[in-house]
Image (cartoon, rainbow, N blue to C red):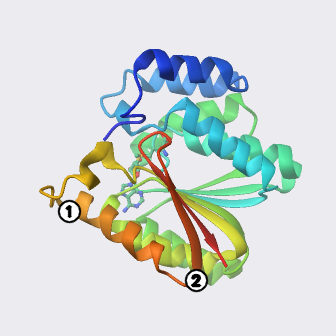
């Protein structure tokens, strides 16, 4: 797994430089996470810039993230929600790890968006179920999925329940550092990602596209 497996370090730096300025709290989170043993789990700055652009463009106000880690992508989302909806914007940030997400909170505070983020620590399937039971079915504008790969199909189904018509889901790591294109790789993560890509392609409930941004993103719109 890597954030931008197909790009060289100079190109990644160039993209970071020419994209819209990164908020200082995002830069702090990215730089601090670089020395974390699981640093490669963080999305790239280029991916963050893309997600921010999409969320701003689509006027996203209510969002869910599955897979928070040290909080970079959640902060990208919360900043876009703040811009779009002021104090009315909300991100449900779902993760199983108290330890990882404790590291995120200081960057959210630094950016002044901690009130925009409702962090829920539990297996994501449980938290997604809870959101539906709390009345959010058909109300969510956007969902970003970046957690355990064997869970993706389940998160996809939960996402379809929670999204409003026209809502967007983005799945990260869909290229899995290129492993999905290696037919001899039958590890559970690779198989799960391949199966979801094939499934979404013919699912009549959605429009889907796969793009080679970062480690591969699949964009899925509920129709
Ligand atoms: C790839 S990292 C997320 C990176 C994050 N989006 C970022 O930009 O820094 C994956 C996260 O998913 C969480 N995770 C793994 N399995 C999970 C599950 N079943 N439910 C909820 N979170 C899970 C991990 O604890 C980890 O923080």
Give the residue number, with chain letter if any, for mark 2: 205
Give the residue number, with chain letter if any, for mark 1: 188
Residue at image location 62% in from the left, 28% down from the top: 26
Res 196 quadrant in image: bottom left
Per the model, the C-alpha gap separating discs 1 and 2 is: 26 Å
Above or below residue 179? Residue 132 is: below
- Mark 2, ligand 1, within 8 Å: the answer is no
**Neighbourhood count class around disc 1 (C-alpha, 10 Å): few under 14, some 14–19, many 20 upward:** few
Q: Secondary structure at mark 2?
A: loop
Tell me where residue 217 appears, x and y as whole percent: 49, 51
Sequence-wise first label, 1 or 2: 1
51 left or right, relative to 55? left
Residue 114 can be seen, yes or no? no
- Mark 1, ligand 1, within 8 Å: the answer is no
210 left or right, relative to 185? right
Residue at image location 36% in from the left, 27% down from the top: 36
């Amino acid at each position: 797994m890597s954030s931008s497996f197909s790009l060289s370090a100079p190109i990644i730096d160039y993209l970071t430089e020419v994209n819209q300025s990164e908020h200082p709290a995002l830069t702090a989170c990215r730089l601090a996470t670089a020395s974390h043993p699981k640093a490669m789990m963080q999305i790239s700055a280029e991916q963050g810039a893309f997600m921010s652009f999409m969320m701003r463009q689509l006027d996203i106000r209510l969002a869910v993230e599955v897979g928070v880690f040290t909080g970079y992508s959640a902060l990208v989302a919360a900043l876009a929600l703040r811009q779009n909806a002021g104090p009315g914007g909300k991100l449900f940030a779902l993760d199983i790890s108290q330890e990882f997400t404790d590291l995120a909170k200081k960057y959210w505070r630094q950016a002044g968006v901690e009130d925009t983020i409702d962090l829920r620590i539990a297996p994501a399937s449980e938290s997604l179920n809870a959101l539906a039971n709390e009345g959010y079915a058909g109300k969510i504008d956007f969902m970003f999925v970046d957690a355990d790969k064997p869970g993706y199909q389940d998160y996809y189904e939960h996402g379809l329940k929670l999204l409003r018509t026209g809502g967007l889901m983005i799945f990260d790591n869909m290229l899995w550092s290129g492993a999905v294109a290696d037919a001899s790789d039958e590890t559970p993560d690779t198989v799960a990602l391949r199966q979801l890509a094939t499934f979404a392609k013919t699912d009549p409930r959605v429009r889907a596209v796969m793009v080679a941004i970062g480690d591969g993103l699949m964009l899925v719109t509920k129709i």
